[in-house]
Amino acid sequence: MTHRERLAYRERLDAQILQQRLDMGMALRDWREATAPIDHGWQKLMRWRAPTLAALGLVSWRTLRRPRSAGRLTRRLMTGLLLANRLRAVYRSMHRR
């Protein structure tokens, strides 16, 4: 292989590497856009980590003391969460227009 052929081969490899870097950069951007809602949800969950752990500790303590009230408490909690979610959806739909 002559010096000129090696230089041409190196140029082709450099161009190929540059193209691969550009492709990987675009793929990374697409990946971040696709996982943004999951990342946002995780960040929100981590923001509320301490209060959530405290609430779960209180619920666990109450459940251990009075096991029969655990089902009633769970139903009330789920009803409250579903109601809050529905109210938030209604509020958002009213303010979009």
Image: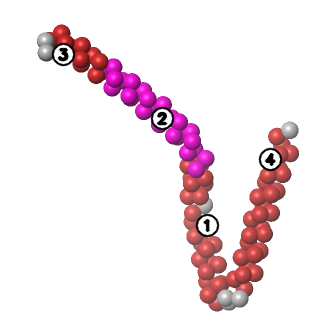
- Residue that label 2 marks: 27
Which residue lies at the image location 52% right of the left edge and 40% below the top edge? Answer: 32
- Residue that label 1 marks: 51
Q: Nearer the observer, disc 3 or disc 1?
A: 3
Q: Is residue 86 above or below residue 50?
A: above
Which residue lies at the image location 42% right of the left edge and 27% below the top edge? Answer: 22
Q: Is residue 91 above or below residue 16?
A: below
Instruction: For marks 2 and 3, give the CA distance.
Output: 31 Å
Q: Residues within 10 Å of mark 2 (few under 14, many from 20)?
A: few
Whether residue 5 appears in this view of the structure is yes
Q: Residues within 10 Å of mark 3 (few under 14, many from 20)?
A: few
Would you identify the image quadrant in which residue 65 lies? Answer: bottom right
- Residue that label 3 marks: 6
Q: Is residue 88 above or below residue 5?
A: below
Instruction: Work out which residue is located at the far top of the displayed protein and give it.
Output: 4
Q: Which numbered disc, 2 or 4, marks the residue that appears first in the sequence?
A: 2
Instruction: Work out which residue is located at the far left of the displayed protein and give it.
Output: 2
Instruction: Confirm whether the magenta stretch covers residue 16.
Output: yes
Q: Amino acid at mark 1?
A: Pro
